[in-house]
Image (cartoon, rainbow, N blue to C red):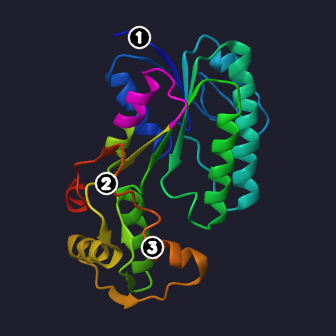
Amino acid sequence: MTRLTVAVIGATGMAGKPVVAELERRDHEVRALSRSSSSYPVDLLTGDGLEAALEGCDVVVDASNAGPKAKDARALLVEGDHRLLAAETRVGVRHHVCVSIVGIDDFPLGYYRIKVAQEEVVRAGGVPWSIVRSTQFHSFVASGFAALARYGVLPKLRAPLQPVAVEEVAEQIADVATGSARESTRTIAGPEIRPIMELATAWKAHVGSPAMLVPLPAIGGAGKALAAGALTDPAPDRRGLISFERALAG
């Protein structure tokens, strides 16, 4: 196996951290890039530090994430990717991997529209590319339930989700990053498509929460898309093996 030098943007985030661990487990040289890094400080909002950090890298994995405000997300994920890809071109990076989300084309959420725009930047960026889309992480779904449970409620929704273990997503990203640029999108999804209320019931039982399951209406386009299964993938390129209950058990 050829040992690669891989830069990971967003290396301390929910997806980036396990990607770094998986690439290091495979004995690749990994540069964890962030604004707070002592070794490779970079700023996608200004472009500061990018060329120096990427010099000598074979692959860049962009696992960056942004807050819920559309303006901030666009500045980081779209405008920031323009700067990132330009820097990659200047130093000769051979493969750019974008970490994305299943269903963004069909789910009318502002953040998802920005992810669509980010993918468009990647495809037109001039660096050979691959995109890896995943369904929602088990940990993300569980944190959503925890947030609602603070108000004493959980969603009694039949709308489906297909949560996946972030460690399995990291394995798929590492597989793609260490191969040739695909110029295409690969998807990874959880092992089961399940109603949200079933997942909420499992979470409630695991943590012993007294929160009550409450019916919630499907509001607007996002509610309809959720109910239609927009955030699931019945036929992903890779299907994870770890169930929601197994992930909760640790």
Q: Which mark is residue 201?
A: none
Q: Mark 1 packing: few (<14 Cα in 10 Å), some, or many (20+)?
A: few
Q: CA distance from mark 1 to mark 3?
A: 43 Å
Place of residue 184 in the rendered image (x, y in percent of width and height, measured from the top left)? 52, 35
Assign the N terminus to one quadrant of the image: top left
- The quarter of the picture where residue 199 lies is bottom left
Residue indicated by mark 1? 3
User: Which badge, 2 or 1, comes first in the chain's sequence?
Assistant: 1
Under tag 2, what secondary structure?
loop
Residue indicated by mark 2? 190
Q: For the residue marked with disc 3, what is the amino acid?
A: Ala
Q: Nearer the viewer, mark 2 or mark 3?
A: 3
Q: Mark 3 packing: few (<14 Cα in 10 Å), some, or many (20+)?
A: few
Question: On screen, 23 above or below 240?
Answer: above
User: Which badge, 2 or 3, comes first in the chain's sequence?
Assistant: 2
Place of residue 249 in the rendered image (x, y in percent of width and height, measured from the top left)? 20, 58
Residue in the foreground of this view, choosing between 137 and 37: 137
Residue indicated by mark 3? 228
Q: CA distance from mark 2 to mark 1?
A: 30 Å
Q: Residue 232: say if magenta.
A: no
Q: CA distance from mark 2 to mark 3?
A: 17 Å
Q: Which residues are magenta?
A: 171-184
